[in-house]
Image (cartoon, coloured by chain):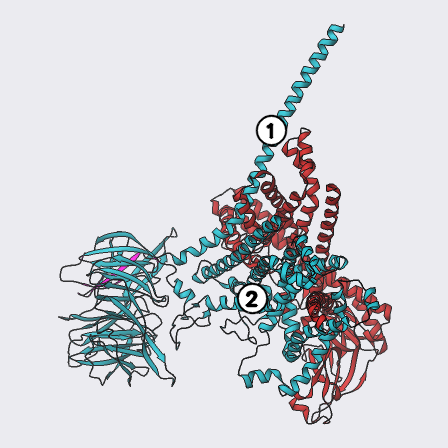
Chain colours: A red, B cyan
Amino acid sequence: MNTWYKSGMPWVWMSAGSVGICIALVIGMLFLIATKGLVYFWPKKVIEAVYKQPGSEPVKIIGEIYDEEKVSVNKLEHIKNILPSTTQEIVRYRIKTGNREVQPDFKIVEAPFLSELTTPRDIVMLERREWGNAYGRIKEVLHNGSVVATGSEAWQEFSRRVEKQKVLFDQITEIEKDEISSINYYRDKNKFRFKKLELNGDKDQAKLDKIKKDQDELDIRFNAAIQKLSALQKQFNEDSFVFELAGGKTLTLPFSKVIGGYRPNEMGLIARIWFYIEKFFAFLSDVPREANTEGGVFPCIFGTVMMVFIMSILVTPLGIIAALYLREYAKQGPLTQLIRIAVNNLAGVPSIVYGVFGLGFFVYTVGGSIDTIFYPEVLPRPTFGSPGLLWSSITLAILTLPVVIVSTEEGLTRIPRAIREGSLALGATKAETLWRTVMPIASPAMMTGLILAVARAAGEVAPLMLVGVVKLAPDLPVDANFPFMHLERKFMHLGFHIYDVGFQSPNIEAARPIVYATAFLLVAIIIFLNLAAIMIRNRLREQYKFNEG
Amino acid sequence: MSNTDQLSAAELLKESISASSRRRAFRMFLDRQAKFFVASGGIFVIVVLMLIFFYLFYVTLPLFKSAKIEDKGRYSSLTKADESTLWLGLDETGTVGTRILSSGKAFFFNTADGSIIREESLPLSGNQQITAFSADGSRSGNMAVAFSDGKALIFSCEYNVSYDKKGARVVSPSIQYPFGETQIELNAEGNAINLMAYRAREDEAAIAYTFDGNIAIAEVKKETAFLSDAVETKTEITRLETQSKADFIVMNQGISKLLLTEKSGQSQLFNIRDLTAPVLAEEINLSRNGKKITAIQILSGGESFITGYEDGTLAQWFEVSDDNNKKHLTYIREFRANNAPILNVTAEDGRKCFYSIDQSGLMAVYHSTAHRLVTTKQLSAASKIGLSPRADYMLEDRDGQTGFYALHNEHPDISWSYLWGKVWYENYKEPAYIWQSSAANDDFEAKLSLVPITFGTFKAAFYSLLFAVPIAVFGAIYAAYFMAPSMRAFVKPTIEIMGALPTVILGFLAGLWLAPYVEQNVPGLICVIFGLFPVFVLTSFLWSHLPETFKQKIPEGLEAVILIPIIMFGTYWFLSFGPILEKFLFAGDFRAWVTYSLGIPFDQRNSIIVGIAMGIAVIPTIFTIAEDAIFGVPGHLSQGSLALGATQWQTLVRVVLPTASPGIFSAIMMGLGRAVGETMIVLMATGNTPVMDFNVFQGLRTLSANIAVEMAEAEVNSTHFRVLFLSGLVLFSLTFIFNTAAEVIRHRLRKKYSSI
């Protein structure tokens, strides 16, 4: 015992435990996010049961068991006396009952009061464009108010019509999103062209006529699109169906509000896997619905990628040039050393400070000046003078500059002097030595720096909240309207989406799965990028061992 | 033939030499260009990075600059010798000035050159003389005069704005009579009114006045006649039952307080919420150090009184509730710029600024809450001043001359002591540190003390370091000194991934998953925190008693791997043990126990959550740097120690750690720097309430989260906006200091390692 203590083994094991805790924390966290995020798309069984709380009428409920928890009886004062005195704790379910327009989305029920629990095969889960999911049974399908199918045929007819409606819906969105929004965009432009002429005091009749002509053309196109749209919409609204909720209440719902209907209890394993894949891709490719609590995250992915892409274009050359200057050209003295320490420190400056700087300097000062010089006709509506994609990218480029500089410099220092001297001895100039020998050898280090910068930028949220991210951007920063790239637009971002949906949305409980799914997506991207950086770095180190040997 | 051959060879050589020299010249040119390009690019990047600091500094600087008073013009005021100026005012844009004279004349003039735009006379009858005057400071241009025969007249200066054909702004000023042109009878006996205080509301006005040693209040109500537009007024007069020989009377803008003060300082404060039944609220002496009062004024907001004394000091007073909820007029703070007696005090409308003029003619501008002398200007003892509604222009009358000034005083409300010291705000019982930048009502005064949010920043950093430092430092020791290389190759990337996890993810897990979980399982969590390390020791003990043959099969340095399942089971077991503990020790509900038995508020998103979540974010920073420092300790030191017979642990504690300790310290500093600046985690894992309480079960608000929450709603270039920039600068400076200190220590350490 004494020798064991004196050997210091308890301390060694305690320090080993600390490493263990770190690893357990990482694995635990990733596991938590992955399970909660990935389980979201798996079709759950829909149960039908009778819930009878003592002293009240029995209620029939249909829904998914969302989660369950064990609760100590002591914390349930109101039902403590009803339960047998031997019960220590009971199971409490949170059941997603859906049909938000008629009842609360969730119902909390205590397991002892639940009876006749079944999973009938004919229960339909409706995914809808409004009011969230609905659970119940399809009773009748109607066309213009008259019954087309009832009973067991109703489900088949329903499935057929849902498919048909999907095609119509795509056509309608295409007109709304592409045609009409494009026409509106050019109409807006036209208005400002006119205003600009006015501002400049330009009374050139030819220019005015051109604007007028364009305007008329746009109006004609607009009317045509509206007509086409209303025809489609009429067709779109023709069909409806009767939906029976738990307890026998029926609703007549139009097909136009339905995305799809499924019978989860009927699905076999293959069907479930197929459903899962379908839902996962829908999540990646759809736009958000219902104040971001449903639907997909495509605009967020697009915004994040776009922002990171522009940032990379900016940060790579700047960071590499700065590192080359510091390492290869600047005189190595106390001043350079001081600059190096300062740059190192900037990597540790809180990101929100960069956000504040970006807002004050880029958005208000630079952006404001751009607006007064180049877009006087649009004022007081800001163009570049309000937060947007360009400013976000630049702010994050500055934020990640130290990362790239430090990493590239490290790569440059690692290159053996012999390589440089060899090149110079053969008569190459300094620039040629750098370009032909030093830079290629240091390129993996630069790559590592860039990947780390990208990973940092993709996960950074705080500064973006000040310089350009919004909860819901109506348009993507890239579209078919001239000049195609709209860098002044605000954009959506995966990280901010997590914050916004998880903490600012009105229905946090219902939004929770989507937050986990988004978090999983973000974590996966960032871990992938970091692992890539680590692998490149390790390869790089191997290479130097070879060079030095 | 050979000759020509030779020639051509020579020519070729010459040519090739000239070509290669041309090429060399070009290459040299490229080299210089590259050098220039890289150097200018590099310097540009470095300058941009340095720009951050200077820009933040540039934005916050106006907060601390003293105000400027700029002379814009001086001209004759065209008054006769027997006329004096009663009141001076300006319109919103400072283009039209107004002068009301004691003779009852009103001049509207162009402020740029003093040219008269319009002249009006108040409807005075016969030999009436103006004996008293009062302006309602909170409604610009609204005022009343009283006469030698006990009558009074209410009027206002209106500036109608229209635009002419060219789109230029035209201001047409006039005198209006909101309560009709008919004079109000304040005293039926016809005694002269000596002093008066006037305030107006929508359809009513109150005038408090003295005559012949008496004090009375008149309530004036406007009644528009049913059919015609003619305005009729109804006046009700109530005499105050008081012995006060008031030398000053002041009424607040809400018409609820009336202060009567004698020069000796003897004062009576009346509650006049009901104008027909005034109640004496308090009798108090406002004199300080036996000095006589020479001026008195009420500040915007109607809570604070400013008294000026004969020794040049000014004091602020407002009502403070005592423990029995009874209000007392209380001395708050003192201002002084000079020694000469204060002659008069003018209050700004909308801000808590006031302007005093003393016997020596010095005008001093103060801000009450910020306790700041904003600026001074030498005028004359005879000067009379008037402010524009937004206090950006000022007129001054003296000796027949009018001066026109522009005031550049955007941020009088900030001072160093205001940001970092306790401030006694109106309606508060005592001085306090408060951050409260906005509220629903209009006349709200922002309270921008940086102390609570800085406190919150350090509180969050403290709890997270409390969680992170033991784990990270112990972990680093193990990883650097005991761990098997094969495991190192796995652990280091894992820790790097941990450091790269977006903080928004950590924050969201903390806020949405951990917080509700911990709320239900605090006792279990406490068990985990205090139980895991003893479990490690126990495992070590059991391990040392395993048969040697078994131990030899497992390579050394894999203790951490063995412990992972133990950690998982241990955590699970401790957490399920929690409810049992809760039942026996805390009557089954820990939260209720904390709230009711300890009397401590319990927030769901509290400092425990922040500590854990931010701890996870900080661990990798500390771990990596500390591990570097320990790993870098030269091998011969420990080898020497081991060779002398010390155990591994002895070597570590006596030799390696003392050498590496500066590095570990620097690692903790870096961790602190990161914890101080972290935004998303604290934003999501705390309730963001700026409370000053070290309680673990309560939330907090940090500098960074505060910026994230409020920046979007702050008006550009307002005081709030600049203070947020200032907090950004504070954050920047804090982290810069921590990081530089850490960097310098590490630099020295590296030198030390290379020398031993």
Q: Quadrant of residue B678?
A: bottom right
How many discs mark residues in the rendered view?
A: 2
Residue A487 lies, in percent from the top left, at 60, 51
Q: Is residue B98 magenta?
A: yes
Residue in the image at 69% along x and 92% along y: A56
Q: Which residue is mark 2?
A: B461
Q: Is residue B132 above or below residue B588?
A: above
Residue B192 seen in the current view: yes
Q: Is residue A34 left or right of residue A378?
A: right
Foreground tag (1 vs 2): 2
Q: Would residue B132 appear left or right of B739 to someone viewing this image?
A: left
Kindly identify the amino acid type of the residue bearing the numbered disc 1.
Answer: Phe
Q: Position of residue B643 (x, y in %)?
A: 70, 57
The quadrant holding residue B385 is bottom left
Q: Secondary structure at mark 1?
A: helix
Q: Which corner quadrant holds the C terminus of chain A?
A: top right
Q: Chain of mark 2?
A: B
Q: Amino acid at mark 2?
A: Ala
Pick the quarter of the image with the N terminus of chain A: bottom right
Crowding at mark 2 (Cα within 10 Å: few <14, some 14-19, many 20+)? many
> To which residue does mark 1 refer?
B29
Query: Is B552 in the magenta?
Result: no
- Chain designation of label 1: B
* Front residue of A502 and B700: B700
Q: Magenta stretch?
A: B77-106
**For the point 56% across and 83% down, which residue is it?**
B595
Whichever of callouts 1 and 2 sits on the residue coming sooner in the sequence is 1
- B266 in relation to B93, above or below: below
